[in-house]
Amino acid sequence: MANYRDIRYNFGSTAEIHTDFGNMILLEKIIASGDETISFTDKIDSSYKEYIFSFINIHPETDSAAATLGLRDGGTDYDATKLTTAYYSWHNEGDDNTGLSYNVGHDIVGTGFAKMGGDALGNDADQSFSGYMHLFNPSSTTFIKNFFIATNTLTEADYCVTEFTAGYANVTAAIDGIQFKMSTGDIDDGIFKLYGVN
């Protein structure tokens, strides 16, 4: 009960709760509908030191797609050099296959698009993935730009797959844009949101 009272004391009113979470400022919302790519091009700048992207029920056009991302560093292409690492856990609907593993197939060192979730997204009506991505200090021209991603997927084989990906843009140029797309097919449906964090 002491912990409960502490929580009530710290968050004693809805105004305080609103203030605490008001530090996330919604900058842009994009609703996908048969899009090849989803791009955020003009809201990532020096206004914030941290940006958060949320992915809500992203539904691929085709089975066996993987969600991917590219980073732009001042040019027109989303080909900033990056390094990533990932691990994932899984559990199937049949309740007979579970595990936790490093995902070497999602490592990248280079300019290509990086995978950010399960490899075999399902395109059944009830299948999608959701999650979020943090991008830190993208306007820095001194440091590399760190990011981490957490996603949860219902795959084509009816597996719940939770994946954690981390990495950095290995450039000192500012990152001024980010693009999301599927490894195959379009983004059939879903909501992408971009927040700045004060």
Image: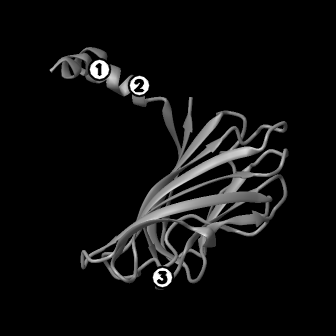
Q: CA distance from mark 1 to mark 3?
A: 43 Å
**Quarter in which the N terminus is drawn:** top left
Residue corresponding to mark 3: 61
**From where the camera sits, is residue 56 visible?**
no
Q: Is residue 8 visible?
A: yes
Q: Is residue 104 shown left or right of residue 59? A: right
The answer to whether 62 is drawn above or below residue 9 in the figure is below
Which residue is at a point 48% across and 79% down the rendered structure image? Answer: 120
Q: State the mark number for residue 20.
A: 2
According to the picture, the residue beneath numbered tag 1 turns out to be: 11
User: Above or below — where is 110 with respect to 122?
Assistant: above
Residue type at the position of mark 3: Glu
**Residue found 41% across the figure and 81% down from its top:** 123
Q: How many marks?
A: 3
Quadrant of residue 86 in the image? bottom right
Q: Do the numbered discs 1 and 2 sit on residues whose CB atoms are within 8 Å?
A: yes
* Picture layout, residue 107 above or below residue 95: above
Please report contact status of discs 1 and 3: CB closer than 8 Å, yes or no: no
Decide: few, some or many residues near mark 3? Use Cα within 10 Å; few <14, some 14-19, many ≥20.
Answer: many
Q: Position of residue 11 (x, y in %)?
A: 29, 20
Which of the marked residues, 2 or 3, is nearer the chain's N terminus?
Answer: 2
Q: Secondary structure at mark 3?
A: loop
